[in-house]
Image: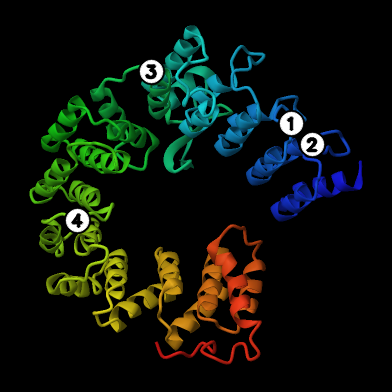
Amino acid sequence: MADGDAQLVAAVRAGNLREVDALLWRGGNPDAADEDGLPVLCTAVAAGEEEIAEALLRAGADPDAVGADGAPVLWTMVAAFAHRPVAALVTAGADPHQVLPDGTTPLLRAVEGGSPATVTALLWGQYLPAPELPLARPVRERLLAAARHWYETGAEAELRRRTGATGPAKTSTVHDDWHEVEQITLGGRTVRAGHGAVLTTLEAAFGVPTPLTELVARAVRHPDPGHVDWHESSSRLGRRSDEEARELVTSLRHHPSADHRRFAADVLGSRQYFLKGTAYPHHAEDRDFLAAWAETETDAVVLAEVLRALTEHAEEHPRLEAIGLRHAGHPDPLVRRMVSGCLWWPDRHLTVEAAAALRALTHDADAEVRLQAALILVGDERQDLDGPRAVVRDLVRDPHSPLRGGAAEALAESDDRTADATELLLSLLDTDDRILRLVGAYGLARRDDPRTPEAYARVEELGPIHRPDHRANALEDWRGRNEALPHAGNGNGNGNGNG
């Protein structure tokens, strides 16, 4: 084995992405094999090093490489639900329609596996953007039938039927790209319960109309906007501007089921995103509809979704501030978390009433409510900033707060130059969280603190800083501003500014 190949094999085995990138950039062989003849891509795949596998594929590694078990890497990645490497493999030329020894294909296995992200990765670039479908009708019908069967039977029930297992299933919730899905292991086989989203994806890809009521049913079967089935249905309806879809969604406002009403609000929010910039004639009408709904909805979870749809795109509405003031004292924190977004508009000063409501919310029992209100107040220079800044610093100070990371980011980006702020940024360098350390170092760099190089060295104690990342690049910017100066660090970089 050549020295260069040996170095690349060692870097892959060590999981050292930075070294792998460096070796490939210097002309390393992406098809290097170890002493047993195993391609280095297979080594990365077997170790679950997805980023390294993607780097090798970008450098030209053979997408049809075969692992030690005799299986092509595409099979392995599909079984592991590794959708990003799957997409890279398909883009590099791996065949998602290759017939396997058992008569299935990688795409069929992915459909049965119930991961919509993996199915989409296999489809993407193959025919979704194309006007003609390359798959024969029997193949498409087989894929649709498989997805429909698993969805209607249920993932766990179908696993039991296929494996004959009678014991308890191991179930967990996992991320499938940006959304969540149940992962079920039983009888030595693992699937994900995203078959509703898989079926919806295939129907859209194959040009098969889905009844609108069926899209709703698939969503509310898992009543959570974070679930893949809900998200796929909401996205499909959100892209539709026809009267049939509008009538269905607006009719759900009065549905006796809170889940159905919440879904309707989510679709209306999605529609503002997907149809933004198009000639959609009912945009203003939809926002008026949401505003009227926000004044009458009694279920807190649904009301929070309605307010989210009204505010997440930071678009003005003449009744928005009044709606926010109306709900500022709502008993449910889910609703109060949405209020801050109702009380401000970009590039406009807060009204007296809105500022007063936000100051009250900075004392809320819910930490997320406090943080959102504080961040809006510190963005308006006409406000007294001491109190809102203290709210942010207190959340950074709390090691148990789930909002610590977000508050730390806000502090690092802010113009809070108090000694307390600097000491808090320094304290982040003692945490065991690499991202928090990076945020602390970034905040020091923005303040031209002379301890910035040492801070970035502390970050790398916990692992490499992956670029591109504006926080990582801040070290080079700091050096450009400070190390070239004859008296670098003697200005305002002592960490004891007066805010």
Q: Are marks 3 and 2 in contact (CB under 8 Å)?
A: no
Disc number placed over residue 232 in the picture, else none: none
Residue for badge 3: 207
In what element is the residue under mark 3?
loop
* C-alpha gap between disc 1 and disc 4: 52 Å
Q: How would you rate the neighbour count of disc 3 (Cα within 10 Å): few for under 14, some for 14-19, many for 20 or more?
A: few
Q: Are marks 1 and 2 in contact (CB under 8 Å)?
A: yes
| Residue drawn at the location 49% of the way across and 83% of the way down | 423
Is tag 1's residue or tag 2's residue first in the polypeptide sequence? 2
* C-alpha gap between disc 4 and disc 3: 37 Å
Disc number placed over residue 62 in the picture, else none: 1
- The residue type indicated by label 2 comes to Asp
* C-alpha gap between disc 1 and disc 2: 7 Å
* C-alpha gap between disc 3 and disc 2: 39 Å
In what element is the residue under mark 1?
loop
Is tag 3's residue or tag 2's residue first in the polypeptide sequence? 2
- The residue type indicated by label 4 comes to Glu
Residue for badge 4: 316
Q: Which quadrant of the figure contains the N terminus?
A: top right
Disc number placed over residue 31 in the picture, else none: 2
| Residue drawn at the location 17% of the way across and 29% of the way down | 248
